[in-house]
Image (tube, helix red, strand yellow):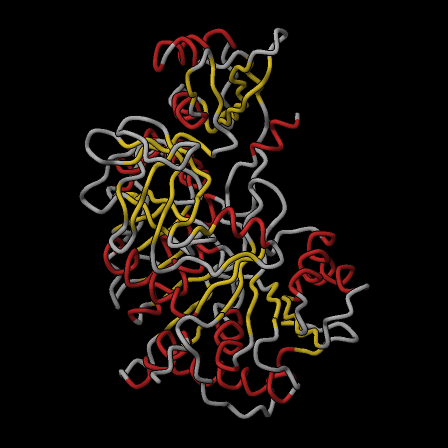
Amino acid sequence: MTNANAAVYFVDRHVAEGRSGKTAFREADGTRRSLTYGDLLHQSGQFAGALARAGVRREERMAMIVRDQIEFPIAFFGAMKAGVIPVPINTLLSSSVYEAILSDCRASVVIVSKALWAVIEPALAENDHVRHVIVIGDAPAGTVPYDAFMEGAEPVETVEAHADELAFWLYSSGSTGAPKGVRHLHGSMKATADTFGAQVLGIREEDVIYSAAKFFFAYGLGNAVSFPMSVGATTVIFSGRPTPDAVFDIMAQEKPTLFCGVPTLFAALVAEQERRGGKPEHLIRLCTSAGEALPRDIGERWEQLWGCQIVDGVGSTEMLHIFLSNAPGNIEYGTSGVAVPGYQLRLVDEADEDVPQGEVGELLVSGPSSAEGYWNKRGKSQDTFQGHWTRTGDKYEQDESGRFVYCGRTDDMFKVSGIWVSPFEVEQTLVEFPGVLEAAVVARADDKQLIKPAAFVVMKEGEAQPDHETLKEFVKEKIGMWKYPRWVSFVDDLPKTATGKIQRFKLRDQ
């Protein structure tokens, strides 16, 4: 059979196609190291050999708690080459969550960046599954330094794998609760590159990509690994927090042509650029946004300042990347666009019947990159993965032009006076009020136990808080009497996952 191991397509073929000396990854911080496609071929093969030498067998799991640095793609594809299952994990969790995830996935190998060791060490104390702990950097006692692990290991050939064979796991971001292990196949990475990467993003070999979303996030993995490596492009990687100052420096110094962010970051960048005045220095030809719906106002202000569009799309860990999106030259800010080529979409009611155009329904998606299921959660897998269709848990309506308009998560939607209210619609309106940076809206019961909207609002730095009644009247006039927030709380920030999704369930708990 043809070897469908993802490492063959994303790593091995580039040397045969003449890209051995082309830079695949370069770091924008620290020592500014870089990795060519030839280096990646050799070192990922060497990592696979080191796993074999250490007695790690095919289909065992390797947990990756690794910051965005050049060792990440080496270990990720090296594991695949050996038939070992890499499990990239969020690098911003607590020790107790790492302990739970490592116990859940039963990884026999853990590879971790030294900067994260203080948080990881307690998570390993009671773990009986981990046999090898590899530390990138100054390795503490009882662990194996990455360099020593690699030293003297002979590169091995990429093992044969079927496109439908398990390749890697990701853990969901936890926007609605505890993370879930999502199992993906070898064919899924190429499927996302062939669909969104090629047909929406239009990625090219000469592109330079910077993704503020990190490698461990499905969105970031596609942006910074799958898409650039599908065409032999170059990825700029940055291990630090993507603050506005850091992102502006990367735009000016590294000169990416594609920039991938999330709505929270785009809002912060717009606010900072408006404060600075003038036009930013950049070579960006196109941006992408995902994780949360992009407010219309932010998209329009970005385009005025940067002179390039933001392709706002919808994806999920379960589908690996974006399946519903606007497209370059055909963008309607405030909508999520249409199905990405290769995917099909449905909106259904509580009885799983298709809803008419203009009515709210739950979004279902069918396409080539869906996960095999959740690990150790059979009931949840049966609820989410139903034949060819995957339930997204998002509520949408389809407008007259056929575009999908986001309304909220299924468990975030609520009715006021018998009419559905979209938290996102109210949030988007609040963000249009002068001085407001971010907003989140949840349901709350009044003293008569009737459900009404409650808003949490973050102001831009230096902006005074408006009068509550003024803000309420603004929403009333814009979108309707029943939709305005009955309560307004001004907060310093909103609870979010590491991938930028607002954790509304935490606000509801308040």
Which residue is at 22% across, 35% downward? 402
Residue 301 visible in rendering = no
- Residue 122 image offset from top left, x and y in percent: 78, 59
Quadrant in which the C terminus appears: top right
Q: Nearer the viewer, residue 24 or 369?
A: 369
**Horizontal side of residue 401 vs 73, given as left or right:** left
Q: Position of residue 77 (x, y in %)?
A: 48, 75
Asked if 410 appears above or below 212 in the picture, the reply is above
Image quarter of residue 398: top left
**Vertical placement of residue 229 versus 354, above or below:** below
Please tell me which residue is depicted at 34% across the width and 14% down the height of the picture.
478
Task: Using the image, determine if residue 32 lies above or below residue 256.
Answer: below
Q: Dividing the picture into quarters, in which one does residue 493 lie?
A: top right
Nearer the observer, 397 or 48: 397
Q: Nearer the viewer, residue 382 or 201?
A: 382
Q: Position of residue 424 (x, y in %)?
A: 42, 28
In the figure, residue 53 lies in which quadrant?
bottom right
Quarter of the N terminus within the rendering: bottom left
Does residue 209 show up? yes
Identify which residue, 462 or 487, lies in the foreground: 487
Q: Residue at x 75, y 60 (%)?
A: 123
Residue 95 drawn above or below residue 111: above
Number of residue marks: 0
Residue 249 percent location from the top left of the image: 42, 51
- 250 relative position to 174: left or right: left
